[in-house]
Amino acid sequence: MNKRNISKILSQPFTYLTEGLQTFVYISKDGKHVLKTLKNLEQSKEQFKRWGLNPDDITEVLTENSEKSYKLAFERLKKQTALEYVHISGERLSFEQIILDGKEYDSSTLQFILQEKVELVRGRIRSLMNDDNITEAKKVIDDIMKLISYIWKQDITEDTFNWDHNYGYTQSGTLTQIDVGTFWNGRKYLKEEIEKKKLTNSVSAKKLKTDFPKLYVYYQKETERLYNEFAYITTQNTN
């Protein structure tokens, strides 16, 4: 997407939608885009407190890696992360102001990422399962495995694999990972993930087991198949 199109998107007002550990999230007036402003370390710790977690578990490493992760995603996983624009280095922009919740901000001093609005995986799975359409729900699981496989083949992995709320479908039907602040680049990180099998034991996996046991059986089978596909990495020396 060229800068003229980005400028047009950012010329419309954005309204607060939600927030995560690393960002505040705003949705565009036309409902097609989300803008995420970056949190600092203290703001991330406050979010951890609200979740009932230990804020001391948040370190500067997380904050420092998040910026690297945004750049990595934009440069190598743009399509797979629904990213349209990343602005974290403070360069001057052709659009001077961005309106967030009715307040104007200097675009050049604002650290943010812009993404296409998506339909979250959890909503699609719940809708399909409520309609007793397990066949199509299994296709969502297939899409998740294909996306993760593609990312792993780039020697990139992530922290949580909470795909039910961190993965979503674009308007064109492409499954993407919208939480782009937790990527780690390097074979040693991928080896660690494969050894620990975070995907198998993620919060999303546990929720799937509780809500839709039949679909979870299929999920288990497919995650095991995925780990077997990349098992060779655990035999490599990555130090």
Image (cartoon, rainbow, N blue to C red):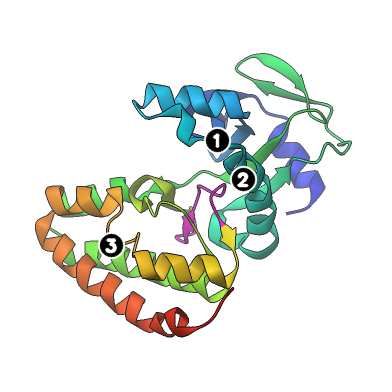
* Residue at 42% over, 52% down: 167
Q: Is residue 111 left or right of residue 61?
A: right
Q: Is there any visible trace of residue 155 in the rendered image?
A: no
Instruction: Please name the residue that numbered disc 1 is placed on.
Output: 22
Q: Nearer the viewer, residue 130 or 214?
A: 214
Q: Quadrant of residue 194?
A: bottom left
- Tell me, yes or no, whether the highlighted magenta stretch contains residue 150: no
**Main SS of the magenta segment?**
loop
Q: Which residues are magenta?
A: 172-183
**For residue 224, above or below residue 217:** below
Q: Nearer the viewer, residue 189 or 152?
A: 189
Q: What is the secondary structure assignment of the residue under circle 1?
A: loop
Residue occupying the far top of the picture: 103
Instruction: Please name the residue that numbered disc 3 is placed on.
Output: 200
Q: Position of residue 31 (x, y in %)?
A: 52, 35
Q: Is residue 51 left or right of residue 40?
A: left
**Identity, as a three-letter code, of the amino acid under mark 1:** Gln
Q: Which mark is residue 220?
A: none
Q: Quadrant of residue 145?
A: bottom left
Instruction: Measure how far apart labels 2 and 1 are at the Cα level.
Output: 8 Å
Q: Residues within 10 Å of mark 1 (few under 14, many from 20)?
A: many
Q: Position of residue 80 (x, y in %)?
A: 54, 61
Q: In the rendered structure, which disc, 2 or 1, sits on the residue that comes first in sequence? A: 1
Q: Residues within 10 Å of mark 3 (few under 14, many from 20)?
A: some
Instruction: Please name the residue that numbered disc 2 is placed on.
Output: 66
Q: Are marks 2 and 1 in contact (CB under 8 Å)?
A: yes
**Identity, as a three-letter code, of the amino acid under mark 3:** Thr
